[in-house]
Amino acid sequence: MRKNIVAGNWKMNTTLQEGVALANEIKEALNGVETKCDVVIATPFTHLVSVVAAVEGTSIGVGAENCADKTEGAFTGEVSAKMVASTGAQYVILGHSERRAYYHETPEVLKEKVLLALENNLTPIFCVGEVLAEREAGEHFNVVAAQVKESLFNLTADEFSKIVIAYEPVWAIGTGKTATADQAQEIHAFIRQTIAEKYGNEVADNTSILYGGSCKPSNAGELFAKPDVDGGLIGGAALKADSFLGIITAF
Ligand code: 13P
């Protein structure tokens, strides 16, 4: 059966020292707490080695927030999936709406990134989600289905079974405006159905689909209670150990 996961996405926040301190606080906060979900923290590249070391011996997973679409070579400033894996990280967030919008990541580029992540045994947390105008036009189902199909449906069923999906409506990210639990359930079920049509019910039932967008301790319980919401990808509320813990324990 699929896993529940709460993953923090630190985005471009914290210095190395602040990040290590935050990882240590999260570790302390979780000490002795029995969680009903896997916990992951995704950090800037610069923090990975130190954060992996900080959480060593715990069940906390560590991830990068991106990786390159190329294997290696003359790509100044890029960080490959192999490099990410070599830090001890186990996850990588791919296709975040901020990467799509500000760094023009296309479905084709994301397809390459997903393949390279899988080749290097990283679990991709693949983000999809519509902008406000698309939701208002009733296009959100089409948009999200296209995002899943264009970058992931080239995978074999075996490869797809290693993917975690995060549904993050762009209008809910950092805005304080959360999708209602019913809105999240409706589209998560639709994503699962889309996966089932391609890969069958077993793969679809085993795929973790996380919700992201202004998730906080006060709304996480209601969201996570929905049958197709398997956890969250958390931005702002993952930057404080107490609010992150409040979300982790909302299951
Ligand atoms: P917020 O939780 O800050 O809205 O961010 C969500 C997000 O983008 C996580 O990837």
Image (cartoon, helix red, strand yellow):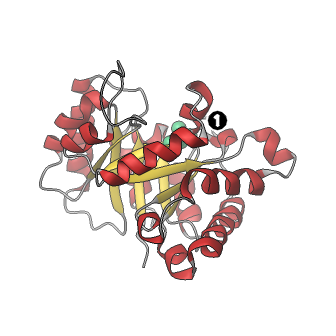
Query: Where is residue 197 shown, x and y percent of the image?
Result: 65, 74
Dot 1 corresponds to which residue?
175
Can you say which quadrant of the picture contains the C terminus? bottom left
Above or below 153: residue 2: below
Apparent side of residue 36 relative to residue 194 in the rendered image (left or right): left
* Other residues around mark 1 within 10 Å, as few (<14) / some (14–19) / many (≥20): few
Q: Residue at x 40, y 70 (%)?
A: 3
Q: Answer with the quarter of the image where residue 213 lies.
A: top right
Q: Is residue 198 left or right of residue 117?
A: right
Q: In x, y percent, where is residue 54?
A: 15, 42
**Percent from the top left, x then y, of residue 196?**
61, 75
Judged from the image, the secondary structure of the residue bearing numbered disc 1 is loop
User: Which one is in front, 7 or 75?
Assistant: 75
Residue type pointed to by label 1: Thr
Residue 215 in percent (x, y) is at 54, 49
- The structure residue drawn at horizontal position 58% and vertical position 25%, both measured from the top left corner, is 102
Q: Is residue 183 visible?
A: yes
Say if disc 1 is inside 8 Å of ligand 1: yes
Q: Which of 141 and 228 is in front in this view?
A: 141
